[in-house]
Every structure is written in structure tokens, then in C-alpha cells.
Image (spheres, rainbow, N blue to C red):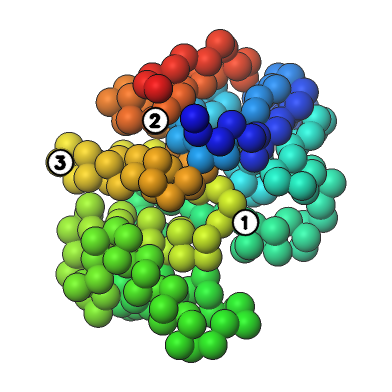
Amino acid sequence: MENKTPVVRIKELSKSYRRGSQIIPVLQNITLDINAGDFLALMGPSGSGKSTLLNLIAGLDQADQGSIIVGDADITLLSETELADWRAGHVGFIFQFYNLIPVLSAYENVELPLILTDLSKKKRRDHVEHALSLVGLEDRMDHYPSQLSGGQQQRVAIARAVVTDPTLLVADEPTGDLDRKSAEDVLQLMERLSKELGKTIIMVTHDPRAAKRACSMKYLDKGILANDTETRL
């Protein structure tokens, strides 16, 4: 049986934005547990609040009320500076458009999150080579983003996300800019990171095919969380 210990515990979470004199509610009273090693898909129409929820879990935004506990830390109680430190150690980000730096090689892009750590150059190299090996690109480490396909660039981005061994991997439409074959390769990789390495992955997606690769799905509509739908055991 898989480990069912919650690594993320969200309780009565709400978030609104101000537009002029209007208060626009985005999330309303969200309560949710995410288990260690889970691969969760967040789905819903545009404007449903799924990216806002992802950003709150990742410590990129702050809630109006409620709590988000990741591991032992209630991140809703952290200051901006404390949140930045927490993100660096606990969250790996995977974006739709890769966010690689064009003038850096694949190796250098993956090494970036390690630069400000106290790891030696040799230890950093060990971590980078291991991360690139996990995504099947150890033979492309000296290539620049312009020399890689979209799917390869996204795999470099995944290597960058996992190189610090974070508590969470958060992915915002990670296959949205890829052709179907490249998207399948990326989803298989994410599925393997969850099933074989126990990585906890939270993915926002509009694509039902992508959501089916996750082990569970949550559906948001107008800021309200619907009943979860299990997509596979």
C-alpha cells in the first residue's frame, strides 16, 4: 500500500482580489489534503481558481484566510522573506514555457537552484548529472535551449525542478506548449517521478488526457472544490 500521509494540509482557505472598488472572490473555503507521493491534477474552466490555488500551495501568493501546512510548516504564517527561503528548499517549479535561460547550457540551467547553497562544485555536479540522468538527457547537458526540442527543454526544466530534492513539484500546464508525443513523454516522466521516486506532484491542466495520467484529480469551479475523482489506483 502506498504512503497515505498528507504532505499538504489545506483548511478553510479563501482568496480574493481587488479590482477597483470590487472584491472578486477567487477561492472559497477550500479544504484539501494531498498525500506524500501523490500525483494530483487540478482541473477546471478558466477563472476557476486552479492556478491561484497552485500559487498559494507553492508560496507564491498569500491567502486571505485559512491555513496551508506543508510538512511541518504553516506557510500562511511566513513573511515574504521566510516564504522565499522556504520555496528555495521545498518547491520545484515546472512551467508551460520552460523558463530556461537561453545563454545557459542545459547543465547550467539545472545547476541554477544549487548556486546559492553550500554544496561544493563537485556535489553540485553530482546532483545535476543525476537530475539530467533521471530525465534521460545526460547526453545533452552541454546543449543550449535553442539546440533542444520543446519536449527536451521541458525535461531540462523538470531536471531543474527536482535537482534540490524538493518536498513538492508544482506544474502549471506543463504539456500546454508541446506536441502530443512530447507531452506523453513528459507525462510518463512525471508519473515515474511520483510512482518510483515518491515525488509529490501538483499539476494544473486543461487537458483531460494529461489529467488521466495523475493518480487523483480535483475539480475547481468558481473557486469551489468539487468532489475528487480518482483516475486510477
Is disc 2 surrounded by few (<14), some (14 to 19) or many (20+) residues within 10 Å?
many
Tell me the tag on residue 181: 3
Q: Which residue is mark 1?
A: 90
Identify the element where label 2 is drawn.
loop
Residue type pointed to by label 1: His
Judged from the image, the secondary structure of the residue bearing numbered disc 1 is helix
Q: Residue at x 69, y 22 (%)?
A: 30
The answer for how far apart the CA atoms under marks 2 and 3 are is 17 Å
Q: Residues within 10 Å of mark 3 (few under 14, many from 20)?
A: few
Which numbered circle lies on residue 143? none
How far across and down, in percent of the image, does residue 107 sit? 34, 76
Badge 3 element: helix
Nearer the observer, 133 or 114: 133
Q: Indicate which disc, 1 or 3, sits on the residue closer to the N terminus.
A: 1
The correct choice, above or below, for 159 with respect to 182 in the image is: below
Name the residue type under label 2.
Ala
Q: Amino acid at mark 3?
A: Lys
Q: Earlier in the sequence, mark 2 or mark 3?
A: 3
Whether residue 103 is visible: yes
Label 1 CA crowd tier, 10 Å (few <14, some 14–19, many 20+): some
- Pick the residue in front: 162 or 53: 162
Residue matched to label 2: 214
Q: Are marks 2 and 3 in contact (CB under 8 Å)?
A: no
